C-alpha cells in the first residue's frame, strides 16, 4: 500500500534502471507481488522528483519475452488508474541516422510501430471505452511542449550537441537487425530502432496521457555488408550506465519544470 498518488509515470529502458534512484523517499513494490503483472524481476518505485509524486517502472516487459501486448502494457493502465497524467518512456536503441553516435540522446518525435503495422497492437480486441476511443488519432502523440522544454534543458546542460530529435521504430526482436532490415528502416525515415516503447505509448495516448519519449543511442545499426561490427546486449547496457547521469539530470529537470495541467511549461 502506498499513499502516493503520482501524476508522472516513468518507464526505465534497458540499462537505465538507475533513473529510478533519483526518486526521494522511495517505496518499492516488486512486480511479483502485484496482481496482474507478469511474473518477472523488476519493481515499481514510488517517490518524489523535485517534490512531485512519481511512479517508475524499474524494468519493463517486452513482447519478445513472450508476454501478450496486453500484459506488456498493463502497467500503463495501472498508472492511469493511479492518476498519472504524463508518461515518460525511455529506451536503449540502435541508430540508423547519419550523424548519430553511441551515447547520444534522441528525443522521440514520432514512431513507426512495425508489429502494429502487421496487426500486433495492444489496443486490439473489444475497446474499453472507460480508457479511450475505439479509433484513437496518433498524429501528435509525443507532446510538442515537452519536447521543446527538453531541448531548452539540454542547451542549459551544455549537451545539446549530443541530442537529436527523431523517429523511433519498434521491431519485435529479440534478434537485432539484418543489414537488409537496417537499410529498409533507414529508407523509411527511421532514425533509431528498438524492441519496446510503441505499445506503451499507444496505450498511454489512448487513455489521454501526455507522452514524452527518449532513446539513448547505445550502438550503430550495421547498414553495410563490409562493416564487421556486431551489436551485443552487454554493450547496450554498458552505454546505458555510462549515460545514466545525464539522463537523470534531464528527466529530473523536465519533471521539475513541466506544467502539471497538460498545457505549457514554465
Ligand atoms: O527498449 P529497451 O527495453 O530499452 O531495450 C532495448 O535493448 C534491448 C536489446 O539490447 C531490447 O530489449 C531493446 O528493446
Ligand atoms: N532492434 C534493436 N534494438 C536495440 N536496442 C538497443 N540497440 C538496438 C538495436 O540495434 N536494434
Image: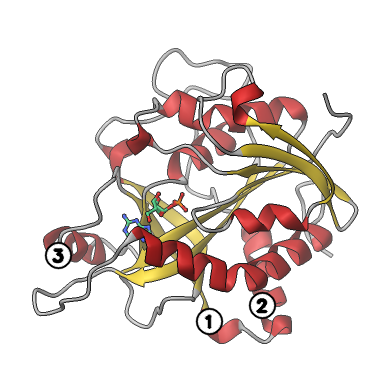
Residue 183 is situated, as x and y percent measured from the top left of the image, at 17, 66
Q: Are marks 3 and 1 in contact (CB under 8 Å)?
A: no
Badge 2: how crowded within 10 Å, few (<14), some, or many (20+)? many
Q: Quadrant of ligand 2?
A: bottom left
The residue carrying mark 3 is: 179
Rendered image coloring scheme = secondary structure
Tag 3's secondary structure? Answer: helix
Comes first in the chain, label 2 or label 3: 2
Q: Quadrant of residue 28?
A: top right
Residue 149 occupies quadrant: bottom right
Q: Is mark 3 within 8 Å of ligand 2?
A: no
Does the residue at mark 1 contact the one at mark 2 (Cβ under 8 Å)? yes
157 vs 193, left or right, is right
Q: Give x and y (percent) for residue 194.
A: 37, 54
Q: Tell me the SS state at disc 2.
A: helix
The residue depicted at 41 percent of the width and 28 percent of the height is: 69
* Position in image of residue 245 (x %, y %): 66, 71
Taking the image as shown, residue 4 lies to the left or right of residue 86, namely: right
**Between residues 114 and 30, which one lies in front from this camera angle?**
30
Between the C-alphas of marks 1 and 2, the distance is 9 Å
Are there few (<14), some (14-19), or many (20+) residues within 10 Å of tag 3?
A: some
**Which image quarter is the C terminus in?**
bottom right
Q: Which residue is pictured at 66% across the width and 57% down the height?
A: 19
**Secondary structure under badge 1?**
helix
Measured Cα–Cα span from mark 2 to mark 3: 33 Å
Q: Which residue is mark 2?
A: 154
Q: Is residue 222 above or below residue 111?
A: below
Residues at marks 3 and 1, CA–CA distance in whole angstroms: 25 Å
The numbered mark at residue 162 is 1
Q: Residue placed farthest to the left in the image?
A: 225
Amino acid at each position: 500500500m502506498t499513499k502516493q498518488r503520482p501524476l508522472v509515470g516513468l518507464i526505465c529502458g534497458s540499462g537505465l534502471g538507475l533513473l529510478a534512484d533519483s526518486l526521494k523517499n522511495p517505496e518499492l513494490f516488486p512486480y511479483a507481488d502485484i496482481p496482474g503483472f507478469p511474473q518477472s524481476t523488476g519493481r515499481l518505485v514510488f517517490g518524489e522528483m523535485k517534490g512531485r509524486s512519481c511512479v517508475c517502472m524499474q524494468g519493463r516487459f517486452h513482447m519478445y519475452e513472450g508476454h501478450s501486448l496486453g500484459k506488456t502494457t498493463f502497467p500503463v493502465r495501472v498508472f492511469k488508474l493511479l492518476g498519472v497524467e504524463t508518461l515518460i518512456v525511455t529506451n536503449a536503441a540502435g541508430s540508423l541516422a547519419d550523424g548519430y553516435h553511441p551515447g547520444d540522446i534522441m528525443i522521440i518525435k514520432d514512431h513507426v510501430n512495425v508489429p502494429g503495422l502487421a496487426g500486433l497492437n495492444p489496443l486490439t480486441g473489444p475497446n474499453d471505452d472507460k480508457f479511450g476511443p475505439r479509433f484513437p488519432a496518433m498524429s501528435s502523440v509525443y507532446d510538442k511542449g515537452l519536447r521543446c522544454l527538453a531541448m531548452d534543458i539540454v542547451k542549459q546542460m551544455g549537451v545539446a550537441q549530443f541530442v537529436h530529435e527523431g523517429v523511433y521504430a519498434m521491431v519485435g526482436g529479440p534478434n537485432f537487425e539484418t543489414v537488409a532490415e537496417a537499410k529498409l528502416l533507414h529508407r523509411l525515415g527511421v532514425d533509431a530502432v528498438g524492441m519496446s516503447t510503441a505499445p506503451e505509448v499507444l496505450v498511454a495516448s489512448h487513455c489521454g496521457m501526455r507522452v514524452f519519449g527518449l532513446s539513448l543511442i547505445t550502438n550503430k545499426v550495421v547498414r553495410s555488408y563490409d562493416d564487421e561490427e556486431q551489436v551485443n546486449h552487454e554493450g547496450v547496457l554498458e552505454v546505458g550506465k555510462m549515460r545514466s547521469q545525464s539522463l537523470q539530470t534531464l528527466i529530473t529537470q523536465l519533471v521539475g519544470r513541466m506544467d502539471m495541467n497538460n498545457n505549457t511549461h514554465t
